[in-house]
């Protein structure tokens, strides 16, 4: 696990700086004690990170659960009662994993997953603009369009422009320039700039700026624009910051309803994030979804027992991990230890970090998730990909994560139903070994993302040193999700010594360099010839 520590350690530092304000902000937006967000971040990093099958996913408190938590704390009669539901929710997730419920992750269309990543990137940018200019009316981690402070995403930006803090803005601009310079120039010049990450330099500079200007009424940064970690006066007083579940209410029906809601929403968010992070993974590794549900269930039960918020795998932390070069789960685990150690040993130092500097880091993360070129790429893939993608993006920006994904998924299903017809025999496998591993796989006339899980399973189950004949001669429609699976499998096939022969109306092609280009430039079969 620590083979790539030179990659994972710098990445864990970046994830730590991204996670810290989000843990605190989500707790604030949830109406929960601030320390509960930190506990969830620590458990998500150390416990879930260790148990997870994902190499690059990072777990912690999720913005998508904030509204549920806020409502539940009020209806259940207090935070201690709510913690019982968190513990039970984790146990229900473990049951989900035993029932193999993780299979539903394979049925989210690629266009919706890409729309989710882009929508979250845009949300991150829009939500960080006020913090960048030193306006912190809305807490970090509130990603809904209608905010807990009574404003919406765009009215908050307008308000921020009327209350710009000169000191916070200056150090934010400097930090942003450092991050861009580090990413575009310095990281390519010498290894030292790869080991020491730009976000760490930006944060240190932010602390130095605060110390030198704290007595200046114009250029100083007020304390409400800094990180706000609870500071225990002593080790003994640390216990006063912790809350524990009140199991006396375990028999109440509303506790179980809340627990099931947490389990369902947390599992859905996790599975969506797993699909998204697997697509971002440069090594195209596949996360075992049922193992991930088990890890999340254990994490939620432990978080609830210790007084923490519910946890899920989170795309903001995970994408920051990938963008910073994280290779294995070590980066997620180390970031959890950084949270634990820093909260215990240097909380006062953490409270000198300007939120505007952390906003600069998140702006870079958001931009990399929502690059304008992606819209052009999705448009070129055709309206069947572009419409669900666009609906998902706008749904997330103008509502929230789950509603946006739900809208995109519904549109995606309608598009598929309009352009597809039922085909009961979509996959045929014939063993033509005769002493050698030679497999013939024939795809049917119509293959959609509904068939993604089965095809992925068959490809992954092929033995090493196999000769695969993939016949698409009669395939008239091949969904973009299936093409991406074939593209990813081609990379794995080289490592597993699997030779691929593609049979189509063009003839026979040995080990195509790009399946995406092949199917994009492939002439459409003439139905009249059938």
Image: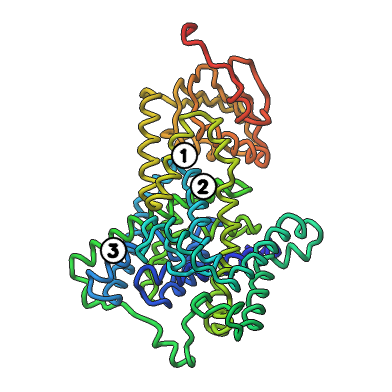
Q: Mark 3 points at which residue?
A: 259
Q: Mark 1 points at which residue?
A: 389
Q: Is residue 461 above or below residue 331?
A: above
Q: How many marks?
A: 3
Alpha carbon distance from label 3 to label 2: 30 Å
Please name the residue shown 29% across and 77% down the image.
80
Q: Mark 3 against mark 1, which lies toward the viewer?
A: 1
Q: Name which of mark 2 and mark 1 comes first in the sequence.
A: 2
Q: Is mark 3 on a helix, strand or loop?
A: helix
Residue 405 in view, yes or no: yes
Please name the residue shown 55% across and 22% down the image.
471
Work out which residue is located at the far right of the displayed protein and give it.
Answer: 189
Snapshot quadrant of residue 420: top left
Q: Name which of mark 3 and mark 1 comes first in the sequence.
A: 3
For the residue pair 340 and 425, the one nearer the viewer reads as: 340
Q: In this view, does 442 lie above or below 265?
A: above
Q: Do the residues labelled 2 and 1 touch (CB within 8 Å)?
A: yes
Alpha carbon distance from label 3 to label 1: 32 Å
Residue 330 in view, yes or no: no
Snapshot quadrant of residue 294: bottom left
Q: Are marks 3 and 2 in contact (CB under 8 Å)?
A: no
Q: What element carries label 2?
A: helix
For the residue pair 320 and 293, the one nearer the viewer reads as: 320
């Amino acid at each position: 696990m620590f083979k790539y520590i030179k990659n994972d350690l710098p990445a864990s530092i970046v994830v730590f700086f991204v996670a810290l304000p989000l843990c605190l902000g989500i707790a604030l937006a949830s109406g929960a004690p601030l320390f509960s967000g930190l506990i969830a971040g620590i458990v998500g990093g150390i416990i879930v990170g260790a148990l997870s099958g994902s190499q690059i996913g990072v777990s912690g408190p999720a913005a998508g659960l904030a509204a549920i938590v806020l409502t539940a704390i009020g209806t259940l009669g207090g935070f201690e009662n709510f913690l019982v539901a968190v513990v039970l929710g984790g146990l229900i997730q473990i049951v989900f994993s035993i029932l193999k419920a993780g299979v539903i992750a394979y049925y989210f269309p690629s266009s919706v997953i890409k729309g989710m990543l882009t929508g979250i990137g845009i949300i991150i940018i829009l939500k960080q603009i006020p913090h960048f200019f030193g306006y912190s009316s809305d807490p970090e981690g509130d990603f809904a369009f209608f905010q807990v402070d009574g404003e919406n995403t765009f009215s908050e930006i307008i308000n921020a422009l009327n209350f710009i803090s000169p000191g916070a803005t200056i150090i934010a601009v400097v930090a942003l320039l450092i991050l861009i310079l580090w990413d575009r120039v310095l990281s390519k010049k010498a290894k030292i700039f790869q080991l020491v990450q730009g976000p760490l330099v930006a944060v240190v500079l932010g602390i130095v700026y605060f110390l030198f200007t704290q007595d200046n009424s114009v250029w100083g940064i007020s304390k409400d624009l800094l990180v706000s970690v609870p500071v225990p006066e002593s080790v003994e007083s640390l216990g006063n910051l912790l809350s524990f579940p009140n199991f006396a209410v375990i028999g109440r029906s509303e506790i179980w309803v809340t627990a099931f809601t947490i389990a369902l929403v947390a599992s859905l968010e996790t599975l969506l994030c797993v699909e998204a992070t697997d697509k971002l993974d440069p090594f195209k590794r596949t996360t075992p979804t049922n193992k991930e549900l088990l890890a999340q269930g254990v994490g939620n039960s432990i978080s609830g027992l210790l007084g923490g918020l519910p946890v899920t795998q989170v795309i903001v932390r995970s994408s920051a991990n990938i963008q910073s070069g994280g290779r294995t789960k070590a980066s997620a685990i180390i970031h959890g230890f950084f949270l634990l150690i820093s909260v215990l040993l240097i909380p006062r130092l953490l409270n000198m970090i300007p939120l505007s500097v952390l906003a600069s880091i998140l702006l870079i993360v958001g931009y990399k998730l929502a690059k304008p070129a992606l819209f052009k790429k999705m448009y070129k893939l055709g309206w069947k990909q572009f419409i669900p993608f666009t609906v998902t993006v706008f749904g997330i920006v103008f509502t929230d994560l789950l509603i946006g994904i739900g809208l995109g998924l519904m549109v995606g299903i309608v598009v598929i139903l309009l352009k597809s017809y039922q085909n009961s025999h979509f996959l045929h496998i014939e063993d033509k070994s005769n002493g050698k591993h030679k497999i013939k796989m024939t795809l049917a006339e119509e293959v959609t993302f509904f068939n993604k899980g089965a095809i992925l399973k068959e490809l992954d189950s092929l033995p090493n040193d196999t000769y695969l004949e993939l016949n698409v001669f009669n395939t008239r429609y091949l969904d973009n999700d299936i093409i991406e699976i074939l593209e990813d499998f081609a990379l794995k096939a080289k490592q597993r010594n699997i030779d691929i022969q593609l049979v189509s109306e063009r003839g026979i092609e040995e080990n195509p360099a790009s399946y995406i280009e092949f199917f994009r430039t492939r002439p459409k079969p003439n139905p009249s010839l059938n």
